[in-house]
Amino acid sequence: MIEALVLLYPQADIFVLSSTPEMIPASLRNQRIYNSYLNRIPLLRRSYDKFMVFYPSAVESMNLSTYDLVISSAGPATFGVNVSQSAMHICYCHSPERTWWDQYAARQSLSRSLTRKILYTARATYIRSWEFGAAQRVDSFVANSWYIAARVRKYFRRESTVIYPPVDTSQGYISDTNDDYYLSVGRLVPAKHIDLLIGACNLMKRRLLIAGTGREEGRLKAIAGSTIEFLGFVPDRDIPELYARSRACLFAADEDFGIVPVEAQSYGRPVIAYGHGGSLETVRVGGTDGQGDTGIFFSEQTMESLADGIRRFEACESSFRPVDIQNHAAQFDTPTFVNKMRDFVDNAMRGR
């Protein structure tokens, strides 16, 4: 996201809560990057969630008073930066932080003691109050999907313009042949529900390749059957062939947008996705006007529902047209994002 915004404003300064040299992409290493005081806390990068209560003060400590245009790429708290009265502040919102908003009740119930429950409640109350107030200072919101626009309206009482985030779809290609495997790409964390993919493929004896690492790796390997293969960390140069030669990409997460389904489609491959959240906007099911489907939705985050989705996909697998799928993905390409953001910012500045 930041790299795409820098295409718009090559001379822009970048302010971040915390960073290390290895975290900075090569394309940004010539930019001026300023860190908040949180960068001086070594433990932050290992347990950032424990320091989220400090994000508001860290954000407000940054001096942006000399800028006439500020674009915040939000994340937790970052849209709370203080800008001058005459400046235009545009927030590109990836999501109101789920920890404090829609997952509040679930997170609170996970607290194992009364003390932890009280501490979580106090932190959440403080941050939600601060974030709501900070959201009222933003001049214009841009949301990364209609799904997130609805959440911005619900929690912050602000309207948004939807501009889908940039995905590099131009590198996609269609393979001459496909192998007999399904593919999962992404971090091995609970929110991705990789266990559902494993369970369904265990049940159906389908080959599943899993590209990625994460804290769930040990547990997931323990439940994996003989048809499941863990690839670990896969270099960027090797990901394209995995996408291009797969039967389909499996995606069980409830994502705000979801980059992986778009990437898979850029290689002409269908997606079998949980029919909720951002997938409803990135995967086309029930296409009209001659537009073919680009995937299959399953309705519940359960092994049985996903297995049913795989069966329905295999029953009509030959009907998916790789070129149509690839063309659908092209609407999310980086130049489209850059052009739409340029027009939006220009119009906002003129209106100001």
Image (tube, grey):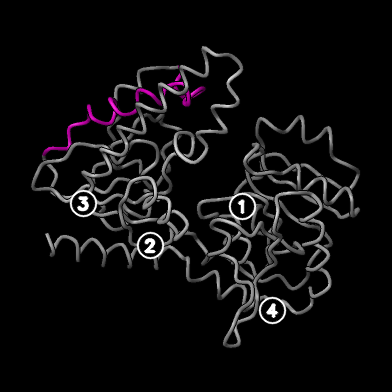
Mark closest to the chain's N terminus, 4 or 2: 2
Residue drawn at the location 80% of the way across and 45% of the way down: 198
Q: Earlier in the sequence, mark 1 or mark 4?
A: 1
In space, the residues marked 2 and 3 are separated at their CA atoms by 15 Å
Label 2: how many Cα within 10 Å (few below 14, some 14–19, many 20+): some
- Magenta stretch: give its range: 43-65
Q: Is disc 3 surrounded by few (<14), some (14 to 19) or many (20+) residues within 10 Å?
A: some
Q: Are marks 2 and 1 in contact (CB under 8 Å)?
A: no
Q: Is residue 319 left or right of residue 275?
A: right
Mark found first going from the N terminus, 2 or 1: 2
The picture quadrant where one finds residue 65 is top left
Q: CA distance from mark 1 to mark 4?
A: 25 Å
Question: Dot 1 corresponds to which residue?
Answer: 237
For badge 4, the amino acid type reads Arg
From the viewer's perspective, is residue 185 above or below residue 233? below
First-in-chain label (3 vs 1): 3
Amino acid type for the residue under numbered disc 3: Asp
First reached walking from the N terminus: tag 4 or tag 3: 3
The residue wearing badge 2 is 162
Q: Secondary structure at mark 1?
A: helix
C-alpha distance separating marks 4 and 3:
43 Å
Labelled pair 4, 3 in contact (Cβ < 8 Å): no
| Rendering coords of residue 321 (x, y %) | 69, 78
